[in-house]
Each structure stands twice: as C-alpha cells, then as structure tokens.
Amino acid sequence: MTIIQASKITLNEVELLFGFQELYDGEFAPFLSLEPVTEAEQQELIKIRHDFRFYLKEKEASEGQVRFIAVAPLLRLAGFYQFPIQLRVEQGIDRINIEDEDTSITGRFDIIAVNKEKQTANDVNFWVLVIETKPSLADSWAGLPQLLTYAYKSLDRQTSTWGLTTNGRNYQFVYIQQGNPPTYMLMPELQLMKSSSAIQLLQVLKAICQL
C-alpha cells in the first residue's frame, strides 16, 4: 500500500482521490448571519493586528507564530474558547483509505474546533471549523489540499463543515459539503491588516462559532 502524507498532497490529487468538485462565486450571506462588531471588539482587533505586525517586519512569521500570535487571539475574541466549543490542536488523523486505490493518506491537523454538545454518528463531536496555518510568506491557498483532506474525514458523519486556511495576513474560508460528489466553495478572501476586512473576518468567525 502507498502511504501519502497529507502535507505533500496537491489540490489536483485531492480532487482526484476524493472526488471533490469546486463550486464558484462563494458568498458568506447564504450560510452565515454576520452581526455588528462592538467598539471593544474593534479595539481588540487593532491590538491583534499591532502585535502581529511586529512579526511581519521580520523576514517571515513562522507557522507557529501565525498560529499563536494571530489565529489564537482571533479565535478567543470570536468565542471559540467558550463551552460548548473545544479546540483540538496538532492531533494525528486516522489513515484515510482511498476506495479502489491501494493508497492511504495520513497527517496531523493544526486546529479543529468541535462542539461538545453536538454529536454526530458514533458519538463523535461535530466539527465546527477546521484550520490549517502556514508561514506568513506562503500563499493563503497553500493549506487548501491539507484542509480538504482533513475535512473529508468528517463528511461521513455530518453534511458540511467550515474550513480556514491562513498565513496570518490572509484568511481563506471554505464551505465543504457532503454529496456525490462532495463539494467545496471558496469564500471571498479576508485580510487581517486592513480594518474593514478584519472586522468582517471577526464577524465570520463569530458566526461560525455560533452555528
């Protein structure tokens, strides 16, 4: 059997192996209700941007720095640290065996937010958001193949999940749905370092957290 590391897989391979089909022209509105951001939350956003800017002035913010200086504070601000949401970090996935192929995929996801009060099949917690982080100089799409690979694991238990791949500066949300074929839809890319886009970024994270 051929074993493939998820970190080495390409988007073409993901679409071929899992049958994923991309849906175009994604918008947040049909799926999420975005609520206004308070003045206090806007001030917190400014602080997160200021803290992360220090790292962006270096040659490159590493994947770990992106995760802890930018993504973690955003998740806290959006409510992901509060029950019933639980964050699971850097856990290995069970091997994904590809039907009709002598191939198995393995890997370790960066962050998954689950709902502890909502169960899917086999008493597995509902996956709310799957996050893949990359260094600041990487393209925000760089984590998309890994993200889809890990999210595919959830589609035999739930009809859809949200994904996010980010380099700390740019945030690419993806809506992933069960189906024949399974589909993924890229949402408009958001940017932390631009005020209006950062506000929408927080609005989207809060809306996903409250699903």
Image (tube, rainbow, N blue to C red):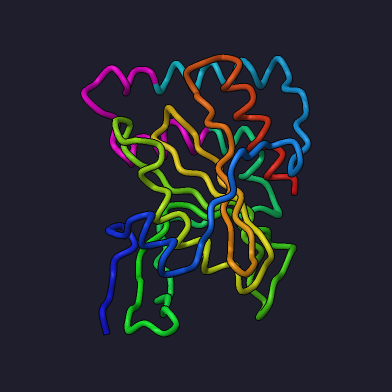
Q: Is residue 39 left or right of residue 1?
A: right
Instruction: Pick the residue in front: 14 or 194.
Output: 14
In the image, residue 195 sits, relative to residue 89, either above or below, namely: above
Q: Is residue 115 left or right of residue 51?
A: right
Q: Is residue 181 left or right of residue 191?
A: right
Q: Position of residue 201 (x, y in %)?
A: 60, 29
In the image, residue 149 sits, relative to residue 191, either above or below, namely: below
Q: Position of residue 94 (x, y in %)?
A: 43, 75
Q: Is residue 116 magenta?
A: no
Examine the image and state in which quarter residue 16 appears: bottom left
Q: Position of residue 160 (x, y in %)?
A: 66, 59
- Specify start and end residues of the magenta stretch as a single range: 53-73
| Magenta span main SS | helix
Instruction: Pick the residue in front: 177 or 127.
Output: 177
Q: Is residue 87 in sight in this rendering?
A: no
Examine the image and state in which quarter residue 51 appears: top left
Q: Is residue 53 in sight in this rendering?
A: yes
Q: Position of residue 134 (x, y in %)?
A: 35, 41
Q: Is residue 58 magenta?
A: yes
In the image, residue 92 sits, relative to residue 203, either above or below, namely: below
Q: Count how many numbered circles sit on residues in the image.
A: 0
